[in-house]
Image: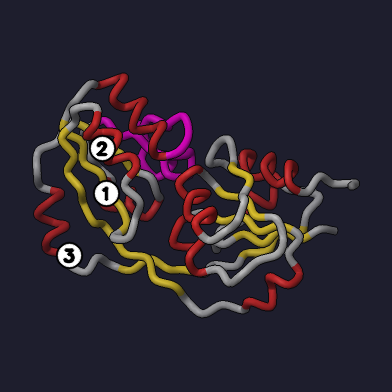
Amino acid sequence: MPVAVLTRADVAAYAAALPAWEVVALPVTRAEPPSDPEALAEVLRQPHDAVLVASARAAQVVRGSDRPIWAVGPATAAILPGAHVGPGDGASTARALLAAMGPVRVLVPRAEEGRDEAIAILRAGGATVIDAIAYRTVPIAFDASILHRADVVACFAPSQASALPALTCPIVAIGETTAAALRARGYRPAVAASPTPEGIANAIALVYPLGR
């Protein structure tokens, strides 16, 4: 049975989407509170018309918001009842928000070291962006020997791409932002068409078709 190593702790849904694979969880980073929690609290109090959230960790700080929320991926949207699920990654979700609401004031909670493609798209579309540093991601120690067993590695965030050692097996990215971080390290990742377990499974099938 081929082995797919996923750089996250919660892999049950991905294992269900990959029944012919041994799916191994290998978290390589963890989320910690922002460097300045008081600054985050102040930013969250600013008036805004909509929220764009790209991760489950960022979603925690806007739970209970009465503003329209646009979430990247169903896993993030599941934490925020009533949220709009974006059509793909953060960039495409930002475009969808602009198309639906126009150049409004948008709160964007994100990682301290997070990419800003969605923010750039919102601003280019005339939106006012309230940039909220909701958490920071730090690397953790992990057993890299597991990677020697991997037939495919799936990566879920730019910070995880930075934490990985050199890989020789095929690699899959959850979205274009993560793929860009992997390309910067010299990889040629397959990119999931949607940030879902099924999207990851389909991308894995492209780089490692079973029965080959």
The mark that comes first in sequence, 1 or 2, is 2
User: Gap between marks 3 and 2, in whole Å?
Assistant: 19 Å
Q: Quadrant where the N terminus lies?
A: bottom right
* x and y percentages locating residue 58 in the rendered image: 33, 52
Query: Residue at position x 78%, y 49% from top?
Result: 208
83 vs 76: above or below: above
Q: Using the image, tell me which numbered label, if any, was put on residue 51.
A: 2
Q: Looking at the picture, which amino acid does disc 1 mark?
A: Pro
For label 1, the SS is strand
Question: Residue 37's mark?
Answer: 3
Label 3 element class: helix
Find disc 1 in the rendering and name its residue: 109
Give the mark nearer the N terminus: 3 vs 2. 3
Q: CA distance from mark 1 to mark 2?
A: 8 Å
Q: Nearer the viewer, residue 140 or 158?
A: 158
Q: Is residue 161 left or right of residue 152?
A: left
- In the depicted structure, whether residue 20 falls above or below residue 49: below
Residue stretch in magenta = 68-89
Res. 84 image quadrant = top left
Residue located 39% across and 39% down the image: 90
Q: Residue at x 66, y 59 (%)?
A: 153
Query: At label 3, which amino acid type do we have?
Result: Pro
Whether label 3 touches label 2, CB < 8 Å:
no
User: Are the residues at dot 1 and dot 2 in contact (C-beta closer than 8 Å)?
Assistant: yes
